[in-house]
Amino acid sequence: MNPKHFSFQLASSLLSIQKEHVESFLKAIINSTVFYRFFSSVKPSCKTALISVSYPTVNDKQVSELIEKKIGQLMTFFNETETVDHEISIDFYTKITKKAWFSTTEESVCWEKWILQIELTKAYSQDKQESLEHAESVLRDTLLKIIKNVDLYKDHIPLISSSEPNPFPFKVFPTLKLAFHS
């Protein structure tokens, strides 16, 4: 099974995010992506990033804690590296049962991969208000791309074969150095 890939960048360049806004940006993007791929009965919740950008979240303690933990790990990773170009992957998995002659094994297979390509920058402008407006604009555009892709591409979603609260577990992690960016 080859996963469906969704990549987020601005035109041919990376999403430029000011270092001071990256945590809010990641919370909004990761929570929104997970929300739209959480196929269980769930009470939605809404949060606000930066000043005025609202985004959906899954109102589930375990999912929220996992996302917060992953964002904390990403922020530590960003602070420990000197690179400014980063690629973050949000992968969704399904379990596939493989049968052999006398045994059965379960394997996790990635069915969807969201790639977030970002460049951590210093302030966009000396004017804090202008800098914040730029960050909100980038976030709003990225959230709209997520909604558009979720609505447009549905054929690759596997059947739900689990009664678990979240039938499609996910992983969030930084990938290796960007190969496309010189």
Image (cartoon, rainbow, N blue to C red):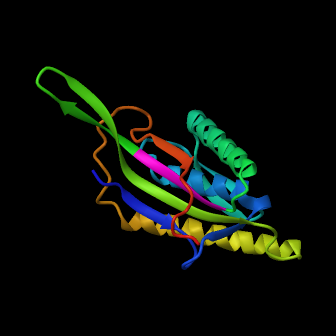
Residue 49 seen: no
Region of the chain picked out in magenta, as a range: 85-92
Residue 109 in the image, given as x and y percentages of width and height:
34, 43
Residue at x-position 46% and y-position 69% = 148
- Which residue is the extreme one toward the bottom? 11
Residue at x-position 39% and y-position 43% = 93
Residue 24 in the image, given as x and y percentages of width and height:
71, 56
Picture quadrant where residue 6 is located: bottom left
Between 46 and 154, the one lying in front of the other is 154
Looking at the image, residue 60 sits to the left or right of residue 166; the answer is right
Between 137 and 55, the one lying in front of the other is 137
Q: Of helix, strand and loop, which mostly describes the magenta segment? A: strand
Residue at x-position 36% and y-position 64% = 153
How many numbered circles does the render carry? 0
Residue 30 in the image, given as x and y percentages of width and height:
58, 52
Looking at the image, residue 156 sits to the left or right of residue 78; the answer is left
- Which residue is the extreme one toward the top? 102
Residue 7 seen: yes
- Which residue is the extreme one toward the left? 101
Quadrant where the C terminus is found in the figure: bottom right
152 is within the stretch colored magenta: no
Position above or below: 5 against 126: above
Looking at the image, residue 169 sits to the left or right of residue 84; the answer is left
Residue at x-position 46% and y-position 46% = 38
Residue 44 in the image, given as x and y percentages of width and height:
56, 48
